Structures are given as C-alpha cells and as structure tokens.
Amino acid sequence: MAKTWFITGTSKGFGREWTEAALERGDRVAATARDTGRLDDLVARHGDAVLPLRLDVTDRASVFAAVRRAAEHFNGLDVVVNNAGYGHFGMVEELTEAEIRAVMETNFFGTLWVTQAALPILRAQGGGRLVQVTSEGGVRAFPGIGAYHASKWAVEGLSESLRKEAAVLGVEVICLEPGPYATDFGGGSIRTSDEHPDYAVVRAELSPTWDLGDPKATRAAILELADTDDPPAHVFFGKSYEDVAAEYEERLATWRKWQPVSLAAFG
C-alpha cells in the first residue's frame, strides 16, 4: 500500500532525495521547505501526490498548522521525517548566545515541534513512524562543532524517552544517524562563529579528509526504514559504525576501570 509522508527540509540534500524516492514509487508526500518554489518541478511531475508546504520549523504555530493540513489533505500520515537542520562551526568558547540559540531552535526545537504536532495524529489513527534525523554527530563529537553536536545529542535524548512513551500507542521512533555525505551541509547550510586566535592550533588539526557518501544512495535505505516490520531504534547511513563502535568500546572500558570508585561513591 502507498504510504503518506511528512518530510521537513525537502528543497535539497537528504530531504529532496527522500521525497523523490517516495514519490517515484507511488507514495504521497507533504514536502516542507522555506522556499516551496524549489519544489515546483516535483509538483509538475507528480501532481496531487505531493503537497508543498512553506514552513519554518522554528515557528511552532506554523508547524502545528502544517502537520494538521497535511494530515487532513491526505487523510492521515504514515511516516514523519524530521530532517530540517543545519551545521554550525565554532569552538565552544567562540559561540555567541544568538548562534547557539539559533542552532537549537532549528535542529532541536524544530524537531520537537514537528514531533508534538504529529503525535496526536499518529495516536488517533493507531500508529505511525517517526524518523528523527540526528547524525553520526548525535552519538559522537568532534572539536569545533559543539553547537551542532549539542542540538543533535539533545534530539537523541528526547527520542529515547519518546520511544519508551509512544510504543504502547503504536508509534515507532527511529533515530537515523547519517555520516558524512555530499549534501549542502558543508556548503550553504553551514554557519560559522568568529574565530579566536588561541584556537588556531586546534583548528589546524580540523581538516580531515571526509569520505563523502552519495545522498542518492540513501533512497532505497529510507524506503526500507519506512517499510520494515522491525524498525531499528538507531541506524547509521554510511560508514560510521567502526569509528563509533571504537569510541563506545573505549567509553565502556573507562566505566569498567572506574567502577570501584563509582560503587564506593554510593555509600
């Protein structure tokens, strides 16, 4: 059966790829973007199967209105994908109040508003699936991207609680954690803080050669996440597993080493 999607951030990157993948197999998509003009070609090709919605996810009232309109237009929602977000480069000390608030407003609060708007609809229809696009950067961290990591780790924590709260209602929650891809993340979607010279040495070491995945290759994977009868709580897209697993093994080793101190602190 055809599915009905609500996807944020569909004008480019993953959102665009996933919208096209769903539409091309015959699904219906409520596609949100700040500039819906960039979705005109999809409307021309797919007609009534796509509902373009102008949306700034930081506007809670507008989010609720958009989700409600989509559900009414398509008579329900099956898959809600929280994809909208952007990256911010800057050392923790360099972040201004406005910068950290802005990235949290979009990446964290935007996800929260869409989630809160969708839950009553999914509850009423007896189920549905939420795909929370966090990042490899939602389960590990690098220097120089603290604001971005903070927003994505926050989404991870929120979603862990939500998964336990919503399971009895038939609502499934997936944290999707893409690694580096050749999207707009490193281009127009990036914001940066003013640089402090004392961090020049750290910054000089922040030039890794990323092995960038092809966003188009995620099309089949996102459809599988939508269709599977056994959705994962967490899943990577890309080649992040080995590096992340090594960090978590190191973390476990540290906890084991300090376990006597931990227990002694119990009293």
Image (cartoon, rainbow, N blue to C red):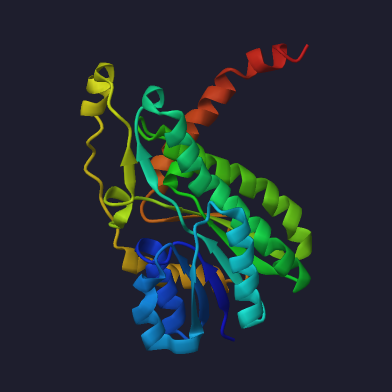
**Image position of 161 with respect to 167: above or below:** above
Q: Nearer the viewer, residue 162 or 197?
A: 197
Query: Does residue 39 appear left or right of residue 105 in this picture?
Result: left
**Image position of 137 with respect to 188: above or below:** above
Q: Nearer the viewer, residue 144 or 237?
A: 144
Is residue 77 among the parts visible in the rendering? no
Q: Residue at x 52, y 44 (%)?
A: 105
Quarter of the view holding residue 45: bottom left
Quadrant location, the N terminus: bottom right
Q: Residue at x 65, y 70 (%)?
A: 68
- Give residue 232's position: percent from left, percent from top: 58, 59
Is residue 81 among the parts visible in the rendering? yes
Q: Residue at x 39, y 63 (%)?
A: 14
**Image position of 258 with respect to 250: above or below:** above
Quarter of the view holding residue 77: bottom right
Query: Does residue 225 appear left or right of residue 167 in this picture?
Result: left
**Image position of 148 with respect to 114: above or below:** above
Q: Nearer the viewer, residue 226 or 148?
A: 148
- Give residue 95's position: percent from left, percent from top: 40, 28
Q: Residue at x 70, y 68 (%)?
A: 122
- Give residue 157's position: percent from left, percent from top: 61, 42
- Give residue 4's position: percent from left, percent from top: 57, 78
Query: Does residue 113 appear left or right of residue 50 in this picture?
Result: right
Count of numbered badges drawn on the protein: 0
Quadrant location, the C terminus: top right
